[in-house]
Amino acid sequence: MQIAGGLYRELCETPKWNAQFGSGGRAAAAVSALSPGSTLHTYARDESSPGADELSDLGVRLSRTHSDIAIAFAYFHPLSQPHIEPRPGSFPQQPPIHVSGDVVLRFGFLEGSAIVHAVRAIYDPQTAVRPEPFGANGSTAKRLALVMNELELCRYAGCTDLATAAAKAMSHGDRVTVIVVKRGVRGVTVFERHAEPNTIPAYYSSRVFKIGTGDVFSAVFAYHWGEAGTSAAEAADLASRSVSAYCETMTLPVQTDLLSSREPITGQAPNRIVLHGSTSTIGRRYTLEEARFRLKELGVEVLSPQLDEVPDSFLENAPSLLVADGLSTTEIRRLCATRSHQNIVILDEEQRSDIAALSDLGVTIVPDFASSLYRAAWPRASCRSLDSCGDA
């Protein structure tokens, strides 16, 4: 398989992460065992780098186009908006990379573009800011699959309704035959010509490491749909399972032996969550406000008694997320006493022994910020063992 995508430095503060992947590098690593000898076409300043050397060790071939621009993404946590250096738009665009092949996975670049000619092409623009139509730069394909999130598709097609956006994108002259829409905890919707949409679930994982999950999804989908010839729905399901495995292990290539045991996210997700925590320091208040903001991004209505006026009607039967930092054992036990224990998730980054004792009551205790938000936002009854499963 031919892959065109960026090879960028990635840093994260919590959990600690320091790697050279980017969309292209991660995709190539993800399918290196499935599609041995795949080629990554990318921009690079140096002939050798830690990320490139690791890809070579996985059997990935590299085709480099020289660029003096070295791009880095820095995250505070996996759900935060990354700081990108140098700032996008502050550097000149490089000459386009040219890629031809039977199966080509094309990602959007920050520093340039890829002109591809393929029998089957898979296009992930990687941005909701004026995403470039596939054929705008001269790219062609006999069959084209678009892989995007909801916002990217709506911006790509210029309308807000998902089904209408998919129909409009398929009406373009780019030979679009499949559109795969990533919808977070709600899974994936697959649109095909002359067929009803297919819904594919997201899958649990014991940890949620979100950096690069979209890259893994696009790569695995591209292999199964483009190279192995499976149906779009089956390819999307295998890609969703692979994302779950990557979230859990944070390693590549994808461990295919883990896919059959993935637990689908089913049932009714909560539409509101009560968020509790301490605001006694600026750091604790920031954590609480950040949790509220990111939960809202996941599509959940959130109110916190420490930050908001919360009506009694909102509290009724609503699950709770407790941020333990700054809360005493007495406060935590008091809050737990007001809710069904099965509806309580506690973020305990310090891994306190007094909180660990609450696990016997059925309370879910999570030591990682991003994972705790997903645990709170998932349906509570659909996972057979919340101690051993989570989401992608």
Image (cartoon, grey):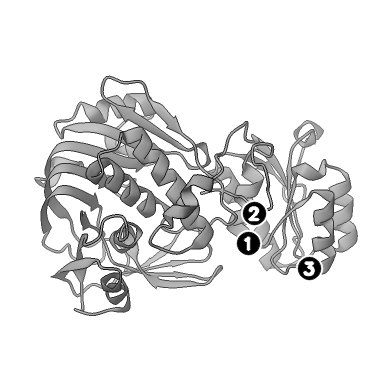
Number of the label disc, if any, that sits on residue 368: 1
User: Please, what is the three-letter code of the amino acid marked with disc 3?
Assistant: Arg
Report the residue at 14% width, 41% height from top. Answer: 135
The answer to whether any part of residue 154 appears in the image is no
The x, y position of residue 45, in whole percent, is 20, 76
Q: CA distance from mark 1 to mark 3?
A: 13 Å
Q: Which mark is residue 352?
A: 3
**Residue 354, image quadrant:** bottom right
Where is 242 relative to 182, above or below? Answer: below
Q: x%, y% of residue 133? A: 20, 41
The residue wearing badge 2 is 372
- Tags 1 and 2 in contact by the CB under 8 Å rule? yes
Dot 3 alpha-carbon crowd within 10 angstroms: few under 14, some 14 to 19, many 20 or more: few
State the SS at label 1: loop
Residue drawn at x 32%, y 51% is 219
Marks 1 and 2, how far apart at CA: 6 Å
Q: Nearer the viewer, residue 388 or 130?
A: 388
